[in-house]
């Protein structure tokens, strides 16, 4: 696994054991879509795992990245990856459950531009997760990486603005509906 573009291009990243990291192809597609939004953005990488998505955001010019991860093995790998290429950059790791982090972040940040969720593919609480993200940061675009086989229930207050299928993986983009 490697950083695809930006100032850390071609740096190698390691993934912890049994986790399913976001593939290079999916990250490349994601950041091609976000290319006009990533510069100087505040980016949240939830269920961060090895941190490959958030590190890619830093590499491509995000001003701040918040990594949310609660698994100890993944945290060790995330910390090693960040230390190997992103020293001196503006990032923070929240070692806690994603829901708890989403409720605490608005007290620490005035805004977030992009929220990326990559939960395990068996995850079933997408509607609740999306509602919490919209409640915490109503102006943010939320992106979910999920299995192309899964049907995602969308909360009424959100609109799906884009869906991109990359093999067995789908990226779904959401925004809060205007009232």
Image (tube, rainbow, N blue to C red):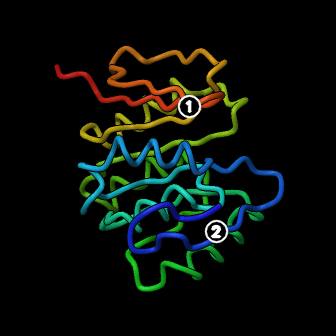
Find disc 1 in the rendering and name its residue: 166
Residue plotted at (62% across, 22% down): 148
Binning the other alpha carbons within 10 Å of mark 2 as few (below 14), some (14 to 19) or many (20 upward) gives: some
Position of residue 16 measured from the top left corner of the image (x, y, whole percent)? 76, 62
Please give the label number shown on residue 142.
none
Q: Quadrant of residue 151?
A: top right
What kind of element bears circle 1? strand
Q: Name, please, the residue furthest toward the bottom.
A: 88
Residue plotted at (62% across, 57% down): 69
Q: Quadrant of residue 96?
A: bottom right
Position of residue 91 measured from the top left corner of the image (x, y, whole percent)? 43, 71
Find disc 2 in the rendering and name its residue: 13
In the image, residue 22 sits, relative to residue 17, either above or below, namely: above
Q: Earlier in the sequence, mark 1 or mark 2?
A: 2
The residue closer to the viewer here, 93 or 83, is 83
What kind of element bears circle 2? loop
Residue plotted at (30% across, 50% down): 35
The residue closer to the viewer here, 97 or 67, is 67
């Amino acid at each position: 696994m490697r950083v695809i573009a930006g100032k850390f291009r071609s740096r190698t990243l390691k993934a912890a054991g049994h986790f399913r990291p976001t593939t290079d192809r999916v990250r490349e597609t994601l950041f091609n879509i976000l290319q006009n939004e990533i510069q100087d953005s505040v980016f949240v990488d939830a269920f961060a795992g090895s941190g490959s998505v958030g590190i890619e955001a830093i590499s491509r010019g995000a001003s701040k990245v918040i990594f949310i991860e609660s698994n100890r093995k993944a945290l060790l790998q995330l910390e090693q990856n960040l230390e190997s290429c992103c020293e001196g950059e503006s990032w923070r790791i929240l070692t806690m459950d994603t829901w708890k982090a989403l409720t605490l972040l608005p007290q620490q940040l005035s805004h977030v531009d992009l929220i990326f969720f990559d939960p395990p593919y068996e995850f079933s609480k997408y509607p609740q997760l999306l509602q919490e993200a919209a409640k915490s940061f109503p102006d943010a675009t939320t992106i979910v990486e999920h299995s192309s086989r899964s049907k995602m229930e969308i909360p009424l207050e959100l609109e799906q603005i884009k869906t991109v299928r990359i093999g067995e993986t789908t990226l779904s983009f959401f925004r809060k509906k205007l009232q």
